[in-house]
Amino acid sequence: MNSIKIILVITFVAIISACSGFKGEEAVPSPHPQEISSHRVTQDNRNVTEKEARWLLNGEEDPYPTQFLTNLDDPTGKTYIRIDDLVDAMQTKEERIKYRDSQVTVSRVSNDGSRMAIVRTISDIEEGDEKHILEVYDLNSGKKESELELPSTAYPVVSPDLNKYLYELNGQVYLYDAVMRKTTKIDLGKRKIDLGIISSGLFSPDGTRFCFEESDQPGIIMLNLSGISGAKRLLTGSRASLLQWDQEDKLIYTISEEDDNYTKDVYSLDIESGEKRWVTKSTAPFILSPDQKLALSAEYEASKMYLVHLSDGRKEDISSFTKNQGIRTVPIQWIETKTNYMKYSNKVKVKRITASSTLPKQGNRSFNVSNLTDENYSTSWCEGTRGGGVGETVTIDLGSTQEVRGIDIADNAMLVNNKYLDVSKIKKMKLDFSDGQSEVLESSDVRFKFDEPIRTSFVKITILEVKKGADFPNTCIGELKLL
C-alpha cells in the first residue's frame, strides 16, 4: 500500500523531463527520440475523440502493481486500457525485447491528457539492484519523446511543464533543468532535514517551488527553486499529508483525526496568504476533480469506488467502471481530455473456444472451457483425463485473421469449504498459430508479449509439462485473454 500511496501523490505533480543519460551531476538529453512503428497503432488513427471525455488513471498493488486508464463516461466498464499495453503499443520491437521483464508505472498524465510520463523499473534479482528509466510519450502521435536513465537510487519528481525534475541522491537534493541542460544542487539551509520521503513531494503548478513532508517531524517543508536558497516550514505542528497542488496555487492536504475510523479532514492552503479552507472528510484513498467539486474515493473493505459530490455529500457507486481491473483499485489522477487512448487497445474477437477434454461437472461446479473467458477468476477450465493433462489442448478460433500481441493466462483459484485447493497447474505450454509460428512459455500464470504482433486466425495451446497439485489431480486454467 505504501507504493500505491506514493504513486497517487507523485502522479498529481510529476511529468518526466525530456532527456537521456548522466555524466556526473549533469544529464544530457537524447538527441534522437525514438518513434514507434506505424503498425503498432490500431486502424483508428484519429488523434482525438469527437468530444472531451473524463478519464481516470487508477491502479492496484496486489498481486503486482497494475495501472489503467478508465473512461468515466462509460458505466459498462468496457472502455479502459492497461498502461503496460498502451506503452507496449508505442514501443519498437527492440524495446519490447530489451524491457520485457520491466515494471511500468505512470508518473503523471499531462493536464490536457495528451502526454504521459512513466517510470520504468528494471530489477536485477541476483544483484538486488534496481534502476529507473524515465520515458515521455506523446499520446496523440504515439511517439516516445525522450528517455533518461537515472542513478540506481534516485526516484524523480517532475514539474508539470516537463522541464524540471527533483531527486535525492546520497543525502543531497538535485534539480535538473531539461531546457538549460543543467543540474543544480539545492541548498537546504543549516537545519538538518529528513529526506526519506521527498519522492512523494509536490511541485507548484509553475514549477518554482517544491513541498514535501518529513517522516519524523510535523509540518511541511517548502523549497523555493527560483534562485532563492534555503527551506521554509509550513503548517508547523500539524501532521499534514500532501495530496495535490492545484492550478490555482492552492496546496491540498489532509490532517488525520485521532479516531478508530482513520478519518481525514481535507484542507486547501493558499500559499501566498496563508488562508486555510476546509474541503471535506475522507476515510479512504481519494482524488479531487480539477474543479474540486467532485471526489473519487475507493473503499477497500467493500471493494467499491464512489463518486462523491462535495457540495452535499451525495455518493454514486461507480464500481462497475473498474469491475474488470481487480478488487482493490485506487484512483490516482482525474483527466479531462480529447485524446483517444483506446486507439492503442487491441481487442481480439474470439469466435469460439474448444478443448480436447473437459472434467465433468461436480455438484454445482462446472469446468467448461467457456469459463476461460468469463472474466471470473473463481471459475476455471479443467482437463478431463486421468493422466494429468500433458498433451491436452485448448484452441481459440478467431473466425478471421487478426493481430495478436500477446497472451494473458491466470491460474485457477478454486475455493472449496473456505479453503483454496492446490490444483495441478501448467508448467510449460506451446502456442501454435495459423501462420506457422509457435511459442513455448513457462508457467500458466503468465502475461507474455510477443516480440512482434502475430497475424493469426487461431491460437492453439498444448500442455507440455504439469506441476502436480496436492488437492486436485486435474490441470486447470482460471482465465485466458489474447492481447
Image: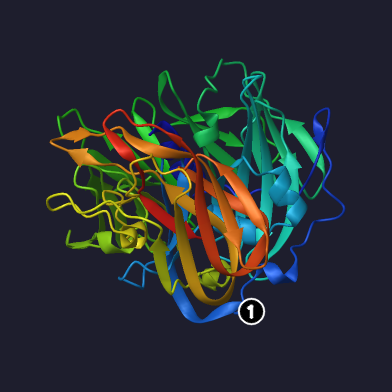
Quarter where residue 33 is shown: bottom right
94 with respect to 476 (left or right)? right
Quarter where residue 141 is shown: bottom right
Quarter where residue 346 is shown: bottom right
**Can you say whether 180 is above or below 240 in the image?**
below
419 with respect to 346 (left or right)? left
Which residue occupies 29% across, 58% down? 368
Q: Position of residue 320 (x, y in %)?
A: 27, 63
198 with respect to 89 (left or right)? left
Q: Position of residue 30 (x, y in %)?
A: 83, 49
Q: Residue furthest bottom?
A: 50
Which residue occupies 75% across, 66% down? 37
Q: What amino acid type should be assigned to the residue bearing mark 1?
A: Asn
Which residue occupies 57% across, 28% down? 231
Q: Position of residue 242 (x, y in %)?
A: 41, 39
Tell me the element at label 1. Answer: loop
312 with respect to 180 (left or right)? left
Q: Which residue is mark 1?
A: 45
Foreground: 172 or 207? Answer: 172
Q: Within 10 Å of the Cα at label 1, are there few (<14), some (14-19), or many (20+) other Cα atoms?
A: some
Tag count: 1
Which residue occupies 57% across, 44% down? 441
